[in-house]
Amino acid sequence: MTAVLPFPLAGWFAAKGWAPRRYQLEMIDAAEAGRDALLVAPTGAGKTLAGFLPSLVDLISAPHDGLHTLYISPLKALAVDVQRNLLTPVAEMGLDIRIETRTGDTPSDRKARQRVRPPHILLTTPESLSLLLSYTDSLTLFAGLKAVIIDEVHAFANSKRGDLLSLSLARLQTIAPALRRTALSATVASPPDFQTWLGRDVQLVTGDAGAEPDVKILLTEGRVPWSGHSGTYATAQVMAEIERHKTTLVFCNTRGLAELMFQQLWAANERKLPIGIHHGSLDIAARRKVEAAMADGKLRGLVATSSLDLGVDWGDVDCVIQMGAPKGASRLLQRVGRANHRLDAASEAILVPGNRFEYLEAQAALDAVMAQELDSDVFRPGSIDVLAQHIMACACAMPFRADALLAELNTAQPYATLDAATLLRLLDFIATGGYALRAYDKFRRLVKGPGDLWRITHPKFISQHRLNAGIIVDTPMLDVCFKNGRRLGQLDERFAATLSPGDCFYFSGMSLEVSAIDATDISVRATSKTARIPSYSGTRMPLTTHLADRVRTLLYDRAQWRRFPADVRDWLKMQHRRSQLPAPDQILIETFPRNGLHYMVIYSFEGWNAHQSLAMLLTKRMEARGLKPIGFVASDYALAIWAIEPVVDPKSLLSADILAEEFVVWVENSALLRRAFREVAIIGGLVERHHPGKRKSGRQVTFSTDLIYDVLRRYEPDHLLLEAAWADARARMTDVGRLGDLLDRAATAIVHQPLDYVSPLAVPVLVLIGREHIAGGAAEDCLLIEAEALATEAMTLV
C-alpha cells in the first residue's frame, strides 16, 4: 500500500522541489489502516512533518469541525516552535486549518476560548492536557479527537511526566475510542519498549540514515585541566567558533553554568556579536524574545540548557558546542542534531571537557555516537502520587465508579498491573487523607455516594486541583523583579538565602544588585558591579551506565591512549607506574596517607548519586568500626573518604548487606526521605503550592510537608505516600539500582592498592574537597593553586 497525497499537499511538495520520504508515506499508510505508530528517525529527517501528515491528509479529505489532533511536547518552547514551522506550510497550501498552542504560558482568556471553540490542531504539554481533562466539557471537547502525536517520546515516557501522559491517553481513548496514537523520536535504543508503552498494536516505522555528524573534542594548547566541570578555560576558543559560524548553540548542563558561560563569552566578545541566554528559570517574555531572535536569524550565539535540547528547528544553527561532559550518548546525539537539522547535511559539534575524566567521557560519548549506540531506557511501574493527581482530575470532570476507572487505568502501560486493593487504598487517601489525617476536613476531597459513584466533596477542591496540578516540582524559587514590577525570572531559594541587600549576582545576562528580599520576591536593580554566579539545586544529570562502561574500557585499553592528548596520556601512564588501572570488570580502591590523614578512593564509575549514597553509608560503617571518618566527596567516576585511622580491609566495608542494614536506617533518618515526601505530597495533592491570589513560599510548603511527614511517620508508617516517597528516594535520589549492582560486583571485583602517596587518578576527585561551597574570587584561586600542587605531587616519581 502506498499513500497518495491529496492535491494541496502534493502541490506543496512539488513547489518546494521535494518529494515525500518513504517513511512519511508509511506513516500515512499506518494511519489509514487505523494503526498506532512509532517513528524512529534521525534529527532532520522530517519526523514532525511525518507525524502531522496523516492529520493534514485527513483534514483535507474530510474537513472536521472541532479538535482533530493533539500534539504533545515535553517542552513549551518546542510547542511554540512547531506551531511556527507548521503554520507556514499550512498557509502556503491555503488550508483552512487552525493551529494553536496551549501551555502554562498561554493567557487564561485564550484557554477559555479554546474549550468553547477549539482549533483543529492543538499543541500542548502533558500537564496542560491533564488540566483540560479535569473539565466537565472535556467529553465534548475530545469526543471527535482523531489523533495524538507525542514528540520526543524518549524524553519523558519512562518518567513521572510519562506516567501522567499515559493516564491521560487512557482517558482520551475512553472518550474517543477510534483515537490513534503516534510517537516520534530520534534516540530510542529499544523501540519495542516504547511500542509497548504507547499502545497494544503499534507499527514501527524507521527513517533513513542521515549524514554522519562531524563531532570533535576541543583542546586548548593540547591541555586538559585537572579539575572543574565548566570548560570555561576554553572561552576564547568557543568565542572564536561563534565568530567562525553563522549561528552557534552553546549547551550547558546547568542553569548556573549557562549564566557563567554567558558572562565569560560576553567579556571575550570583542566584536560585540549578538549573543543570548536561554534557560528554564528565565521569565517567559525573555525566553520568547530569544526564541524569536533565533528564528529570525538575529543571534550569532545562544547559551542554553536542556530547555532547548529537544527538536527545536532553527535552520541557521550550523554548530553546537557542549560545555562539560554530555553524560549520555543519546543526550549528545540529541544536542548535536540541533545543528543544520537536515538529513543530508552533517551536523557539526564540539565537545569541551571540563577535566581529564571528562575528556575520557567525551571521547566515549563521541565513539558511541559514531557507532550509533544509544543509552538504554529503564521503564518501571507508574508512580502512585501521579495516579492520585490523575484521579482527582477525573473526579473534577465527572463522578466515576471504581471498577470502571480501574479498567481504564489498566490500559495505561505503567499501571497495567494496578489492582483493586491498591486503587481502594488510593481512593481512601484522596477521600480522607489516610488514617492519621482523617479528622481534618481539608483532606476530605472525595466521597462515595449513591450508585457507588465517587465525586468531589466541594467545588473548592476543583479550583485547588487546577491551581496546584503539575508533575514538575522544582526546588523552592523566589521571583526576581525590577522595582517597576518587570519580572526577570526565578532564583533558587537556597541561593537567595545567601543574599542580602547590596549583594550582586548575574542573571538573565545582566549584573543585578539586590534592593530588597521578602518571602517570595527579590527586588533588584541593574548594576555594573562584579557579581556572583547563581547556583541551582536539583537533580544532577547522571552518567549513563552505557557511557560508564565505555569510559572503563578507554581507561584500561592502552591501545586507545594514542587518541588522547599528551597530558591525558601522561596522566594515565603515570597512574600505571605509581599504582594501577582497573580492568573494565574491576573496582579499584586506593588507600594512602596525606597530610596526617588517611584516604580511601573508590573508582566505580556508577554516577554521582550512587557514589554520594555509598560514601554516606561507608562513613557510617567506618564510624561504627572506630576508623573516625572526617568527610567525603563524590564525582561521577569515583568517591573519596578521608579519616583519622587507615582502612586496611576495604572489601569488608563494601559487603552487600550494607543495603539491608545501614541503607534503611540512613535514608529514614536523613533529609532525603523528607525531600522525596515533599515532592510526592505536592504531586499527590496533599499539600498546596498555591492559594487563589497568592503563592506559598518554599519555606511554607516545606514546613507543611515536614509536619505531615512527622505525623505519618509516627502514626501511619504504611501510608501510601510514605511508600511512594521511599520508592522515589531509592530510584532517583540514591540510585539504589546502580548502587546495588556496584555492591554485587564488589564481592569479586575489588582490587585494593595500598599506596604511600596520592595517585594521579585520585587528583580529579580530591580537588573537589572544599569546592562545593566556594562562590569564586580569591578562594577559588586558592583551590586552583592547591589543585596544581596536588597534581605535581601525584605526577612526580618518588
Image (cartoon, rainbow, N blue to C red):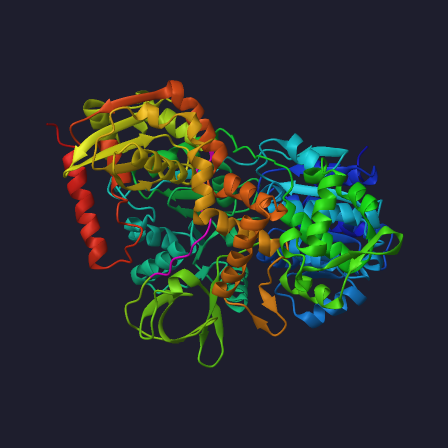
Q: Is 466 situated left or right of 330 in this image?
A: right
> Principal SS element in the magenta part?
loop
The part of the chain drawn in magenta is: 533-544
Q: Residue at x 30, y 41 (%)?
A: 632
Q: Is residue 785 above or below residue 278?
A: above
Q: Out of 426 and 377, give the one closest to the viewer.
A: 426
Is 796 on the left-hand or right-hand side of 639? Answer: left
- 7 part of magenta stretch: no
Residue 440 x %, y %: 66, 62
Q: Give percent across and percent down for residue 504.
A: 32, 70
**Residue nearer the viewer, 541 or 458:** 458
**Which residue is pictured at 47% across the width and 31% down the height?**
660
In the rendered image, which quarter is residue 798 located in?
A: top left
Q: Position of residue 51 (x, y in %)?
A: 70, 45
> Which residue sits furthest right?
451
Q: Is residue 118 above or below residue 620?
A: below
Q: From the top left corner, tell me how far across and down residue 766 is, in percent.
A: 25, 40
Is residue 123 at least partly visible in the picture?
no
Residue 392, by quadrant, is bottom right
In this view of the protein, can residue 18 be seen by the observer? Answer: yes
Residues 615 and 358: in front is 615
Dividing the picture into quarters, in which one does residue 626 lie? top left
